Image: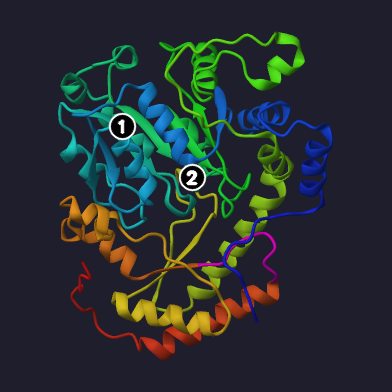
Amino acid sequence: MKIPFSPPFIDQSVIDQVLDTLQSNWITTGPKVKALEQEIVKLTDSKAAICVNSWSSGALLMLKWFGIKEGDEVIVPAYTYCATALSVMHCGATPVMVDINDDFTIDPAEIMKAITPRTKAIIGVDIAGLPCEYQVIKSIITDPVIQSLFTASSEKQQRLGRILLIADAAHSIGASYGDRASILMSDIGIFSFHAVKNITTAEGGCVCLNLPEAFDTASEYNFLKIFSLNGQNKDAFLKNNGAGWRYDILYPGLKINMPDICAAIGLAQIVKYKEDLLALRKAIALKYDESFRLFDWFIPPVLKDKDRESSYHLFPLRIKNIIELQRDRIIERLMAKGIVVNVHFIPLPMLTLFNDLGYNIKDYPNAYKQYSSEISLPIYPQLTNEQSDFIIQSVIEAVVAEVGLDSMVEPVYTV
């Protein structure tokens, strides 16, 4: 049986939306992008949404908007995809890496220890779709002692008066914190609509604004839309619809706008996301969880707790008392059966770029511990019962054959 890891959800409604865009003769930024932004606001209750061409672009946009520059520090987890840290580096600032909790999310206690007068922002990463402990992080950055350390060096920083909290919500569209969308717990949240995400636009992302009352959301939205199109005050759609050919460049902007042909894919998916696509993901995650809980070697992921519920983007299977090499051999056994799995993620300090910059995985023991035992299983709406049954049985057989549940061994670092 051949089971892919995460194919995009393409049904007739997606095809119809894309065809409608093609037949309209308007494929770059236009009405479909605007409609997708409105649907994201509706789904999340965010104050505003700005669609861009990737998560990375959205992060770079917002760090520049806040005035992040050389000499500044931004706290990020050591356990994330490289884009989280690269967006900081592209601003000339320094990513300050900290360790994670057992649930894969950034450890607030480690954040507290890492804050300095140079700290301008914190990027929490919602790994696998589980929101970070945002309430705890917010209590840290609004603490009077911590706020007294904050030194503003831009107009936006002066207006906020504290460390900016950004949610790397690449995995977590549809996740909740209490009775609200989890993205509302941050000042700024950024979704990814990459091909493997819960909602895709092939490539794309979206910035959601939930800034405090000191900011005028409409003004910030307008600025960001212009800045994301090279700082140009008229886009092609406006000019094509009678706004005149003459334009001006107001800011040293970026060219990171999302085109309508991409937005059409996401627009078809988002209208059925909460009731259909997300519900199917949840059902598969619960099936995995219930099946593997019969075995002592299974470390259950946090899918839901008293505050948070995941978006079920990934199912991060973890196995007790194994080392990285054993995990890799289990993956090989699953791949040999036609089951494509993945690992989320290789911790940043284990990657050549960051290791060469002086980051050392030994300084982030929990990140390594979680990585060394994690296998991301297929989870998507098109996955059939027959396929999920085969995955479950194959995982059980692979673990029993490979591990034998040895006693705990000391970590063997590969970098």
Q: Quadrant of the N terminus?
A: bottom right
> Closest to the observer: 202 or 5?
202
Q: Is residue 300 above or below residue 111?
A: below
In this view, the mark in front (2 or 1) = 1
Q: Which residues are magenta?
A: 377-384
Q: Is tag 2's residue or tag 1's residue first in the polypeptide sequence?
A: 1
Q: Residue 214: x percent and y percent?
A: 40, 11
Residue at x-position 48% and y-position 40%: 55
SS assignment at label 1: loop
Name the residue type under label 2: Ala
Residue receiving disc 1: 91
Q: Residue 152: x percent and y percent?
A: 23, 16
Residue at x-position 34% and y-position 81%: 326
Give the quarter of the image for residue 332: bottom left
SS assignment at label 2: loop
Q: Is residue 127 above or below residue 330?
A: above
Q: Residue 257: x percent and y percent?
A: 56, 30
Q: Is residue 139 left or right of residue 199?
A: left
Q: Quadrant of the C terminus?
A: bottom left
Query: What is the total number of numbered labels drawn onto the structure image?
Result: 2
> Closest to the observer: 363 or 231?
231
> Closest to the observer: 47 or 275?
47
Magenta stretch containing residue 379, yes or no? yes
Q: Residue 52: x percent and y percent?
A: 55, 33
Name the residue type under label 1: Cys
Q: Is residue 98 left or right of residue 344?
A: left
Answer yes or no: is residue 414 visible.
Answer: yes
Give the quarter of the image for residue 363: bottom left
Magenta stretch containing residue 240, yes or no? no
| Most common secondary structure along the magenta stretch | loop
Residue at x-position 70% and y-position 70%: 384
Residue receiving disc 2: 170
